[in-house]
Image (spheres, rainbow, N blue to C red):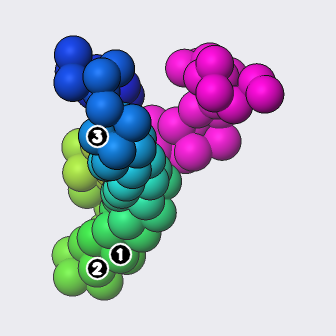
Amino acid sequence: MHFKTEFAYCDPGVARAQAGIENFVEVAMWILFGVICPLAVLVLTVLNIFRYGEWKWPIIIGCLLIATTSLTMLLFGDKIYGKKEDDKK
């Protein structure tokens, strides 16, 4: 995710601030999709099993899809989205 503005190319201070915001957004997204979503899916699945005493297939399958997507982003995100030019230095 890159948020570029015309001001970032004129003022170095704004460019550094812009890069900080980009890094924060990226880290926040990785934490959300890579950590919080799988944990929430796991907790909801276990609670569902204890509450109903049986597997509710639509809920379980949906949770597994979310967890699979989240873990795929976490493990293979760099390969899927490619490396940024700044990282190649």
Q: Are marks 2 and 1 in contact (CB under 8 Å)?
A: yes
Magenta region, residue range: 65-89
Mark 2 or mark 3, which is nearer the start of the sequence?
3
Question: Residue sitting at 63 percent across and 19 percent down?
Answer: 85
The three-letter amino acid code for the residue at tag 2 is Leu
**Res. 43 mark:** 1
Q: CA distance from mark 3 to mark 1?
A: 42 Å
Residue furthest to the right in view is 89
Q: CA distance from mark 3 to mark 2?
A: 47 Å
The three-letter amino acid code for the residue at tag 3 is Val
Q: Nearer the viewer, residue 73 or 49?
A: 73
Residue 72 counted in the magenta span:
yes
| SS type, badge 2 | helix
Q: Nearer the viewer, residue 13 or 27?
A: 13
Residue carrying label 3: 14
Q: Position of residue 35 (x, y in %)?
A: 46, 63
Q: Nearer the viewer, mark 3 or mark 1?
A: 3
